[in-house]
Image (cartoon, rainbow, N blue to C red):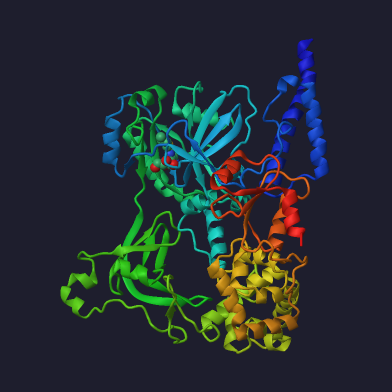
Amino acid sequence: MMDLFSEIEEPERDELKALRKELEEANYKYYVLNMPTLSDREFDEKMHRLQALEAQFPDMFDPKSPTQHVGSDLGKKGFEQVKHKYPMLSLANSYSREEIEDWVRKLPSNAEIVCELKFDGLSISLWYEHGILVKALTRGDGVQGDDVIANIKTIPSIPWRIERTDIPEFFELRGEVLLPWERFEALNKEREEQEEPLFANPRNAASGTLKLQDPKEVARRGLDAYLYYMLGDNLPGTTHYERLETAKQWGFHISDAIKVCHSVDEVMAYIAYWDTERKNLPVATDGIVLKVNNLAQQEELGFTAKTPRWAIAYKFPAEKQLTLLKEITYQVGRTGVVTPVANLEPVQLSGTIVQRATLHNEDFIKSLDIRPGDRVWVEKGGEIIPKITGREIGLNSIRRADATLLVDSAEYAFPTTCPECGAKLVRVEGEAAWRCPNEAGCPPQIKGKIEHFVSRKAMNIDGLGEETIDLFYQKGLLKNIADIYDLKLEDIAAQERLGEKSAQNILAGIEASKQVPWARVLFALGIRMVGETTAKKIARVYNTIDTLQWATAEQLCAIEDVGPQIAENIVAYFNDMRNLEILERLRQAGLQFEGEAATGPQSDKLAGLSIVISGTFSQHSRDEYKAMIEANGGKNVGSVSKKTSFILAGENMGPEKRKKAEDLGIKLMSEEEFIEMVNGK
Ligand code: IVH
């Protein structure tokens, strides 16, 4: 009889669990990612159904159920520092068979060794209580780390909840957070287009991403994670390998490249295989980790102050080659930055032929003291872009091989004039780059600006690629972005390689670009340091070009993400008569110089104020308050600091924020007071 009953009950219990999961995710997507997945009505209906099911099955009560707490906006605040349950240690490194043999000699003679890939990202510690992910801590200083759970929850392969009865009350899984190569390359490409500094390697990119206070952006970047170590009391299994197998069954992302080895030969074969094969993996690895398999043996071996004795890393040798630096040439970018480039005797590195590498700037060249004619080291480690790491002073060096040659070898000097147009270069104080100031007359700058303008994220004009722009520039058809809108069918069609059909396509693309919204037009103008995101934020506050044109640097600084340098660039852009002429022509052509909704600052009542919003509100939503702050010239900031002017405090304000505000003596303002302040005379 009982059996029959439980069978009848089963589908509803499953429905209850599924609803909890769905609503939990919906809450997260709504409050943290600002990406609602359910309509309010659907959400309410599901919540009522969950409440009914929970009443029907009181034994399934769960204090963490979405019925028991309101959706949280965790993730918009700073990170909480949490002490690790077990210190997060690092690993001793080894680089050769001999060093591995030395380590193996100190192990029990029958010790099995688990070989794993050493993932090159950031370590993370995931805490599961009653099957629910409750904390995700970075390594920090090894003793305590930041709880970055809101960001970690954007990783699809990390489960938020394990629905099993055979799991311990508490367990911890450690692993590595990574930005896959493909995502890393796409992110850097995007940053290059927006003139933001590039990440040197996927590890830096993953680290920068995990520190963001904006889980929506984290989700967009696409982190992944591999887990490799389970800790806790009363865990199943007697070996490390079994534990990872168990974790895999519980739904965790565990690498398939794990192998139990019984001899150093086997270990070396594993290393040799993966040293090549790793190049086909979607994520970066920088070595192998060797771990004693038996957990009792692990315990016996124990730890030194910094590392376990039962594990060791073997690092792959960085791939580097010595080659001749034939010549240093220079590239001029669309904003006039002159970048020195090393032209090398072609050399094979990580499966590709390298013949060029960036030398970044004058300081970089001077710090390595490299000169054309030197033999230089080229490396390709975690980086996709090869880099020069030094020169060879030994016999291989042409310059140094015969000291008498030094007499003729002049110390390297960065050019003083633009290699493209001959203008005198300038170096802005505090910047490492030399720049060509001849914006309107330097060919790569002119072409670069046009290329940026037509690019996909800007005006998205199909058919106008780099080569066509170059051709039109040579023929005198394009000298600036406004000329695009004067192109005629017959002019285009008359060009070699371009028939009437392509001409029509180009013109159609140009026509369509007239509908591109104001924020993208602003980005397309190519104002220095105004990337896609910044342009959007500016366009939200200044919804017409006319208001933006008259904004002062101080006013611009009140916009989120706009610092003094960007503000000055914007002001300088609008102070240049040539730009104003171009803008007027673009206006005549019919480009969108106005946003849809007028959300520009309607007053300066909050000008210069940094305001934190915390808690839940009854009269307006958080986003509405944010818009009100910006509309009145204020700045909405995420965390409380000395600089915070006041906190717009709703119900259930976070206790940490409250304490911090008290400590710093920062005023809490109620919604009523705030509305009075903004609407009052
Ligand atoms: S085990 C107590 N396994 O390498 C030992 N670490 O250089 C715990 N790492 O901090 C670490 N892949 O961030 C382990 N398969 C792997 C790993 C791995 C990458 C990282 C980890 C650690 C660092 C040490």
Left or right of 97 on screen, residue 164: right
Q: Compared with residue 353, is residue 266 higher up or lower down, i.e. above or below?
A: above
Quadrant in the picture for residue 425: bottom left
State the quadrant of the C terminus: bottom right
Q: Nearer the viewer, residue 572 or 109?
A: 572
Q: Is any part of residue 2 visible from this angle? A: yes
Quarter, ligand 1: top left
Looking at the image, which residue is at 41% across and 62% down? Answer: 386
Image-based side of 103 in relation to 81, left or right = left
Give the residue furthest to the top.
1
Position of residue 225 measured from the top left corner of the image (x, y, whole percent):
53, 43
Q: Position of residue 56 (x, y in %)?
A: 80, 22
Q: Residue furthest front?
A: 681
The residue at 79%/35% (across/down) is: 47
Q: Is residue 117 visible?
A: no
Tell me if residue 77 comes above or below residue 497 in the rendering: above
Indicate the quadrant containing the N terminus: top left, top right, bottom left or bottom right: top right
Up/down of 349 relative to 242, above or below: below
Q: Is residue 69 above or below residue 359?
A: above
